Image: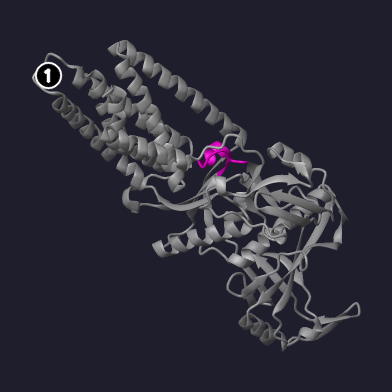
Amino acid sequence: MSKAKKIITSPRVIILIIALIFSIVAINPHFDNEGVMIKSVLKGGPAELAGMTSPKASTPPLSKEVIISINNINIKNSEDYYNTIQNLVSGQTVAIQTDNGIYNLQLGNITNNPLGLSIADAPTTNLRKGLDLQGGTRVLLGPEEEITNDEMSLLVDNLKERLNVYGLSDIIVRQVSDSLFGEGNQYILVEIAGANEDEVKELISTQGKFEAKIGNETVFLGGQDIKNVCRDASCSGLDPQRCGPVTGGYSCGFQFSVTLSTDAAARQASITKDLSVIVDNGYEKLNESLIFYLDDEQVNELSIAASLKGEAVTQVSISGGGSGADREEAIDNALKEMKQMQTVLITGSLPVKLEILKTDTLSPVLGEEFLKNVMEIGFFAILAVSLIIFIRYRKLEISIPVVVTMVSEIIMILGFASMVGWNLDLAAIAGILIAVGTGVDHLIVISDETLKSESSAYLNWKQKVKRAFIIILVSFFTTTAALIPLLVAGAGLLKGFALTTIIGLLIGVFIARPAFASTAEILLTK
């Protein structure tokens, strides 16, 4: 039997080959993909009204919907997409073809996001890029007062809901601690890919307590008292009567309707039944107004028609506005304010106020440059290691399997990341490099132990390999023990680094190293 056939039929090598096949299938490379992937769909935007939906967080990249053309114009990348939507006008019907079908969108007022879509270039693999590689914002939050574990869990759930309702995608919200086993100060780490810093800070730094009062009495609160918030064009949007020039720029108003609970409607009836009716410029109204407060700051005041005195009304119109240097900026700010207020009304207030302790923002361009540099460094590192090992042993039977083993480990780690939906960021890449580098050390230990002729001449091949693996296992358990504190207590990058390194070591020690030992035995045994 030839040595090649012996290698392929070796049980340890067969396990390696099976693991590689599963990894490649999980990664599923499609390097010729064109178009733009839909990352999220804006709530109440033209795309959602046309039937488009945001992908679930668990959806693999290659399974997400991809835009192929807009108004019969082929879309190959993000640049094509943005060049095409620049030419759209208000009221226009837009035909969007995706790999799932054709959608006809009716545009409203043109903003910086007229279709209501967040997009990225079509993915070429199922590998998920983390914040460092695709850009976005990472925020570390701390509660302003001490809270229980149950309150912290409620806070995390509320933040997730608020960010999802707002329409942001690729969100990670998790609880972290600054000490081992979570016994120290508790924090919340929020990572949002593709979102700018101001947008995130404004949404999560405020408690979001929405309250409507008549006099000093509360009529309703955001969250539980709100049964429905209108976000489509039929009952929400800009108020054309309140959009025009003001001192120092432009101002535009918005309005949308909400449906109150029966309890909130009954409170309104009870509070208004004893109010007086007054006449203002021929308009009959009650002598008290309905005042809206957001985080204890007054944001709007509405007159109450006399006909609503003592009436349990469940439909209420909410209004507000935004300003800017010009009309376009005023419209954008008004729509942004409306969207934020709708989000707070739906999700309710956070249990406590949060303090922003640290903010990191990374641009997509910088992330792409990081990835490019890592790939180049990785290639030259493998080349350098291969050359050094060949110079050391002067045997292709050792140097070639070492290179194959290193590449195999990288593929298996990436395959595992694809299968479990693991985001690859700089910390994960550093963990992969550490795991593979440690693997090279292990391969050298195997090579040295099996090629010794003096001190171990009395040992057979299996005994030599066994002795090598004793050294490898001791090294593995020592390294893993050192990384467990980072895995348990680490926040953000430290935790990702520890997890990646441990997974890489497990794959290497129990799959790649045994296959290398079997291959070396077959190639070196005469």
Is residue 129 found inside the magenta-colored segment of the image?
A: yes
Quarter of the image that includes the C terminus: top left
Q: Which residues are magenta?
A: 122-137
Is residue 393 visible in the rendered structure shown here?
yes
Q: Hey, which residue is sitting farthest right in the picture? A: 282
Q: Is residue 395 left or right of residue 310?
A: left
- In the rendered structure, the answer to whether residue 285 lies left or right of residue 137 reads right
Residue under the point 69% across and 60% down: 51
Asked which quadrant contains residue 322, the reply is bottom right
Q: Position of residue 512 (x, y in %)?
A: 31, 32
Q: Secondary structure at mark 1?
A: loop
Tell me the residue at 38%/47% (across/down): 178
* Foreground pick, 501 / 349: 501
Q: Who is closer to the viewer here, 133 or 404?
A: 404
Q: Name the residue carrying label 1.
A: 456
Circle 1: is it few (<14), some (14-19), or many (20+) Cα within 10 Å? some
Q: Residue at x 24, y 35 (%)?
A: 478
